[in-house]
Amino acid sequence: MGKNIQIAIDGPAGAGKSTIAKIVAEQLGFTYIDTGAMYRAVTYKALKENIQLNDEKKLEEMLLKTKIDLKPSPNGQLVFLDGEDVTKKIRSNEVTANVPQVASLAKVREILVAKQKQLAKDGAVVMDGRDIGTHVLKEAELKIFMSASVEERAKRRLLDNKKRGIPSDYEQLKEEIALRDQQDMERKISPLVQAEDAIYLDTTHLSIEEVAEKILHLAKEKME
Ligand code: C5P
């Protein structure tokens, strides 16, 4: 057994981060932490409670009374919001379209980032998101910035949605992904940007296995 390192995987929507992060974590016996799921859970709850998504004060109050748990299961990671399994609900088009607005608020990020740091403090984690290498786990031993063309990412999302039983349209997905990238890259706090010490991986022409293999190889070097 090597060192219990931290692996940070960042990149735009639909680049395959969560699929890859899950495989890498499983192979290394590490914990996978999907930070996007946390921002999604907060957005889901705010929508349900009819809170204005730009009302930072109300969202902060809501968050301080909110419990988000990520639990591994044989069918992938489950997301619990105040004890309720919201794994599927947080993937709806409505939640997806509204997450960037909620994720742009300083207070929301402050609370969730503190939780993410706490979850990763003992190492042996693979964490994916937008600001993991740049803010959440600045000291991570391995940082990956993963991307792919917007067409390829829309294609992958389409397949993914089909598997999850979510109806969607390719052209619309492409537009939504491009818009979400723009919102995530242009926000003031912790925008989506590659960390200086991250390794860039263009996955457009790579299979899931090839990407996972590359990262596992890099991880094992760091664990020696
Ligand atoms: O990764 P996923 O697509 O589920 O993320 C949903 C949204 O959550 C992103 O578009 C982004 O607005 C936000 N997010 C973030 N920081 C993270 C992870 C996700 O701002 N670390």
Image (cartoon, rainbow, N blue to C red):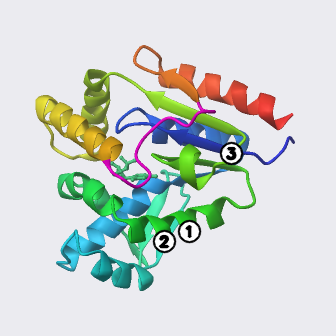
Mark 1 is surrounded, within 10 Å at the Cα level, by few (under 14), some (14 to 19) or many (20 or more) other residues, namely some
**Residue at position x 21%, y 75% in the image:** 48
In percent of width and height, residue 34 lies at: 49, 53
For residue 115, above or below residue 128: below
Q: For the magenta stretch, what is the residue range?
A: 187-198
| Displayed quadrant of residue 103 | bottom left
Q: Secondary structure at mark 1?
A: helix
Query: Is residue 179 left or right of 191 when viewed as pictured?
Result: left
Mark 2 is surrounded, within 10 Å at the Cα level, by few (under 14), some (14 to 19) or many (20 or more) other residues, namely few
Residue 111: mark: 2
Q: Secondary structure at mark 3?
A: loop
Q: How far is disc 3 from disc 2 in space, using C-alphas?
A: 20 Å
In percent of width and height, residue 39 lies at: 38, 61
The quarter of the rendered structure image containing the N terminus is top right
Q: How far is disc 1 from disc 2 in space, using C-alphas?
A: 7 Å
The extreme front residue here reads 188
Q: Secondary structure at mark 2?
A: helix
Amino acid type of the residue tagged 3 in the rendering = Ala
Residue 113 or residue 95, whichever sits in front: 113
The answer to whether residue 147 is magenta is no
Read off the residue under disc 3.
140
Amino acid type of the residue tagged 2 in the rendering = Ile
| Displayed quadrant of residue 99 | bottom left
Residue 98 or residue 182, whichever sits in front: 182
Residue 115: mark: 1
In percent of width and height, residue 66 lies at: 42, 80
The quarter of the rendered structure image containing the C terminus is top right
| Displayed quadrant of residue 84 | bottom left
Mark 3 is surrounded, within 10 Å at the Cα level, by few (under 14), some (14 to 19) or many (20 or more) other residues, namely many
